[in-house]
């Protein structure tokens, strides 16, 4: 094809928002012709949107140089600003981003008339200052940038700046005003008022803000709205870093574990530089959580170790993994240390919730109550249903362990309602197990069985093997199962636990019997069922619905 025709095709594709076609045509055209700086800007945008950040940064660098050669200081400043935006979130390139912002500032200082680029410069420098905690200054800079965006009618700048104001207000503990501005920015995103680069940046920032304060309802609402817009952009690869991870966390909460796993793996694949990308640690931690919930303990441990190597302490996931493996001493040691070391409020909430579970397994009710009390105080300072549900679940479990089943039921039923409202099936099922235990303490055997059956159905559907294993000893095996297999009730309990993948030592700990006794039960199971391996036993348990 004639280079001129290819270039024309690239420009047309860019105007139509056909980013992959534009990228391919521009890269083809520049093999035989020199691209104009405007074309390099378009190539940079297309490259960024399809996920080729290296090409995007390289194209902006070349466009900047070409504009300078042409004597167009304003356009050169614009390219420098966008280049800073592309690279400033990469720790290994933050100094370079600062250098490009200084270059843009110097160029704009030579421009006499007010211009929209001054607003973009304010947004870029405000983002840099945010990392230093200068939130009042940051908020003022974003407000000034918003005024410039309004003056010049630049919807992208106005939306980005108002979103920045909202984040600054939230950092200054004015959550209501901050969230109102974030919601306003997302309205502009989902209504298609702004371009895809700013749309993706705003969405990812909003979902991160919601994650930080456990506002899962708002995060899911905007994710659903944004997804409709995103689905109409088939070429776009906007989700990067923490954005991918938080989307995976939402999918996990709502029971879409397969999709959550895919998103987490995609995040790990994109974030290969574990040493310098803190997002990599968060991505591997999320992957570890999903493997742990499914009972894939070796894979979970590998993921947690990768998270640790990238600088993310793998707690409370690693402590819960040890609990699932029956290593109660290790679990207790890990969670006690995590409580002492964790200061970040988001992670501390998760650590406290895990501590309640682990300490109750250790039968240390006082330690469990202490963690529960702190978790409750945090929830009381918030109006968010996720924190309230987490605290109510913990309160119910502690009350039940303390011999107060009626008080436990009050807290647990409140938690159940909140988990159901949030469409959190796993947490809802876990709470129903504890409700079943409360009913059993109160002598309502039928009520307990109904709760256990409902929880078991969810665990089975999600593939939550460890949760199913914890439930197995609580449910009396059906007489038909024992008679049809020739196994005793205890042997069926052991078979169920073998099917979750845990060791004989862990089974012994779970059932309160010796490892030698478990060995004998396993041997009897293999003989009676004519099985030769634990894998075959697992397959048998699933085929005969013994789980």
Image: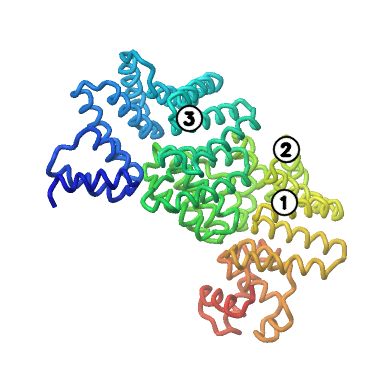
**How far is disc 2 from disc 1 in space, using C-alphas?**
20 Å
Residue to which mark 3 is pinned: 158
The residue positioned 53% from the left and 40% from the top of the image is: 186
Q: Give the secondary structure at mark 1.
A: helix
Could you classify mark 3 by the number of other residues whose Cα lies within 10 Å: few (under 14), some (14-19), or many (20 or more)?
Answer: many
Report the number of discs.
Answer: 3
Cα distance in 3D space between marks 3 and 2:
40 Å
Left or right of 255 in this view: 152: left
User: Dots 2 and 1: beta carbons under 8 Å?
Assistant: no
**Element assignment for label 2:** helix
The residue lying at 75 percent from left, 73 percent from top is 476
The answer to which image quadrant residue 420 occupies is bottom right
Badge 3 marks a residue whose secondary structure is: helix
- From the viewer's perspective, is 207 left or right of 269? right
511 versus 314 height, above or below: below
Residue 278 appears in the picture as rendered: no
> Residue 163: x percent and y percent?
52, 32
Residue wearing tag 2: 374
Residue 280 x, y percent position in the rendering: 44, 43
Give the crowd class for mark 1: few <14, some 14-19, many >=20 residues within 10 Å. many
The residue singled out by tag 1 in the image is 418
- Colour logic: rainbow
Q: Is residue 234 above or below residue 74?
A: below
Residue in front for this viewpoint, 131 or 302: 131
Which mark is first along the chain, 3 or 1? 3
Q: Pick whichever, 6 or 329, lies toward us.
A: 6
């Amino acid at each position: 094809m004639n280079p001129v025709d290819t270039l024309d095709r690239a420009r047309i594709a860019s105007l139509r928002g056909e980013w992959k076609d534009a990228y391919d045509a521009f890269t083809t055209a520049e093999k035989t012709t020199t691209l104009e700086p405007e074309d390099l800007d378009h190539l940079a945008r297309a490259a960024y949107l399809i996920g080729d950040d290296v090409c995007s940064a390289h194209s902006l660098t070349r466009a900047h140089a070409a504009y300078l050669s042409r004597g167009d200081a304003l356009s050169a400043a614009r390219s420098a600003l966008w280049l800073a935006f592309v690279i400033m979130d990469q720790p290994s390139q933050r100094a370079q981003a600062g250098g490009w912002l200084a270059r843009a500032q110097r160029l704009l200082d030579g421009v006499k008339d007010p211009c929209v680029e001054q607003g973009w410069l304010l947004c870029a420098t405000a983002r840099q200052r945010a990392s230093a905690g200068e939130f009042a200054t940051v908020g003022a800079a974003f407000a000034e940038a918003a005024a410039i965006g309004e003056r010049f009618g630049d919807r992208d700048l106005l939306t980005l700046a108002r979103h920045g104001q909202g984040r600054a207000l939230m950092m200054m503990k004015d959550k209501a005003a901050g969230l109102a501005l974030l919601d306003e920015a997302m309205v502009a995103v989902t209504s298609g008022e702004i371009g895809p680069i700013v749309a993706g940046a705003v969405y990812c920032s909003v979902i991160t803000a919601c994650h930080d304060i456990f506002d899962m309802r708002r995060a899911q609402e905007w994710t659903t709205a944004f997804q409709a817009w995103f689905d109409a952009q088939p070429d776009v690869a906007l989700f990067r870093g923490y954005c991918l991870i938080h989307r995976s966390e939402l999918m996990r909460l709502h029971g879409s574990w397969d999709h959550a796993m895919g998103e987490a793996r995609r995040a790990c694949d994109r974030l290969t530089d574990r040493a310098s990308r803190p997002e990599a640690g968060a991505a591997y931690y999320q992957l570890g959580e999903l493997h742990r919930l499914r009972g894939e303990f070796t894979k979970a441990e590998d993921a947690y170790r990768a998270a640790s190597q990238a600088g993310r302490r793998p707690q409370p996931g690693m402590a819960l993994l040890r609990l699932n493996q029956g290593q109660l001493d290790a679990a207790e040691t890990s969670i006690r240390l995590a409580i002492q070391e964790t200061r970040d409020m988001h992670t501390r909430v998760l650590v406290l919730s895990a501590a309640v579970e682990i300490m109750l397994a250790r039968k240390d009710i006082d330690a469990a109550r202490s963690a529960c009390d702190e978790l409750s105080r945090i929830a009381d300072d918030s109006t968010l249903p996720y924190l309230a549900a987490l605290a109510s679940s913990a309160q119910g479990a502690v009350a039940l362990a303390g011999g107060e089943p009626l008080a436990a039921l009050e807290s647990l039923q409140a938690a159940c309602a909140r988990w159901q409202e949030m469409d959190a099936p796993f947490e809802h099922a876990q709470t129903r197990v504890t409700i079943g235990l409360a009913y059993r303490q109160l002598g309502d055997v039928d009520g307990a069985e109904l709760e256990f059956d409902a929880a078991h159905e969810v665990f089975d559907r999600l593939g939550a093997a460890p949760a199913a294993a914890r439930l197995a000893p609580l449910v009396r095996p059906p007489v038909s199962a024992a008679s049809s297999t020739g196994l005793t009730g205890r042997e069926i309990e052991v078979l169920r636990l073998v099917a979750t993948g845990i060791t004989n030592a862990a089974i012994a700990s779970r059932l309160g019997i010796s490892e030698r006794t478990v060995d004998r039960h396993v041997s009897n199971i293999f003989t009676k069922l004519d099985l030769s391996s634990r894998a075959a036993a697992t397959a048998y348990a699933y085929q005969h619905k013994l789980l």
